[in-house]
Amino acid sequence: MKINKIDIARRQLDVAVDIFLSDGDLISVITLAGAAEEIFGTIVSVGGKENAVKFLVRSHKSLGSKLVEKEIRNHANLVRNALKHADRDSDENIEFDERQEAIAMLSRALTNFSKIDMNGAFPLMEKVYEQMHQIRNA
């Protein structure tokens, strides 16, 4: 099988969105959307555009944060990385808000994807944000 990185990330994101929309496992949403976000983010950066994490870093700095870029990145990816690695921490448990992290990771992945293919990203964005609106109003 030969497949390019954009197609890989798109498939990961599509499945993450499907799981999210069906009220499925949010850890899977975070993990799949996180993988897609990372691939799309690298492609966006290589293309000379600002990816979602770079935007977070810039935003923190403009708001007066004293954290260095690496600390901001580590914090932004803390849950995603904890869900896919067992060697990072001696603690076997992690506490976080699944829904908040899933929404954040989907948002980052969709933002990065939109900078590569707005026509492909927009329908997914509409579905996710409509679902978020329904959850908020429930």
Image (cartoon, rainbow, N blue to C red):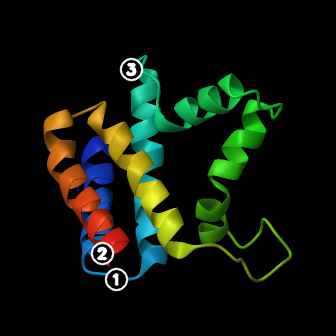
* Residue 4 visible to an observer of this rendering: no
Is there CB contact under 8 Å for labels 2 and 1? yes
Left/right of residue 16 with respect to residue 86 in the rendered view: left
Q: Residues within 10 Å of mark 2 (few under 14, many from 20)?
A: some
Residue 10 position within the rendered picture, expressed as x and y whole percent measured from the top left: 26, 51
Which residue is situated farthest in the top direction here?
A: 48
Q: Which mark is residue 19?
A: 2
Q: Residue at x 33, y 46 (%)?
A: 110
Left/right of residue 103 with respect to residue 98 in the rendered view: left
Q: Is 87 situated above or below 14? A: below
Q: Is 79 situated above or below 28? A: above
Quadrant where the image shows the N terminus: bottom left
Q: Residue at x 32, y 65 (%)?
A: 132
Give amino acid for label 2. Answer: Ile
Q: Which residue is mark 3?
A: 47
Element carrying mark 3? loop
Is there CB contact under 8 Å for labels 2 and 3? no
Q: Which mark is residue 24?
A: 1
Q: Residue at x 71, y 48 (%)?
A: 74
Give amino acid for label 1. Answer: Gly
